[in-house]
Amino acid sequence: MTEIDTFVRFESDGECFEVPIAQPGTCGFGRSLENTVVLTDTLASRDHAVITRAEDGACLLSDLGSTNGTRVNGRPVTAPTALSSGDVIEIGRQAIVFIQGSAPRGV
């Protein structure tokens, strides 16, 4: 069994969730049921943001042209942004913590 070392953690309705991010793979955020992480916050767009994880494990967060924007550690995401373990992604009123147990290869 492969250990999951990269995931996002967030709370919703008083419950804590951890969603793994495959390597390579994507993790989408938004109100649409098509997303990996479905948000109920009305400030989130249907397809709000996405984390893309490369073969080497590096993760980039991109805003998908959302109405209210995406922030990482309080800074607006205006271009694909590299993530580090412990970064806090803000989408609407939702705070999502990015966790990565080991650094991407080549970093």
Image (spheres, grey):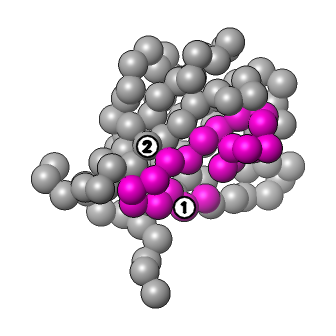
Q: Which residue is located at x 43 percent, y 43 percent?
A: 52
Q: CA distance from mark 1 to mark 2?
A: 12 Å
- Tell me if I can see residue 102 in this picture: yes
What's the amino acid at mark 1? Answer: Pro
47 relative to 17, above or below: above
Under tag 2, what secondary structure? strand
- Name the mark on residue 82: none
Under tag 1, what secondary structure? strand
Which residue position holds label 1? 20
- Provide residue 49's location: percent of width, then percent of height: 58, 31
Where are the magenta residues, as a range?
Answer: 19-38
Residue 93 falls in which quadrant of the image? Answer: top right
- Name the mark on residue 52: 2
Q: Which residue is located at x 50 percent, y 57 percent?
A: 21
Look at the image and say whether residue 24 sits in the magenta stretch.
yes
**Foreground: 85 or 47?**
47
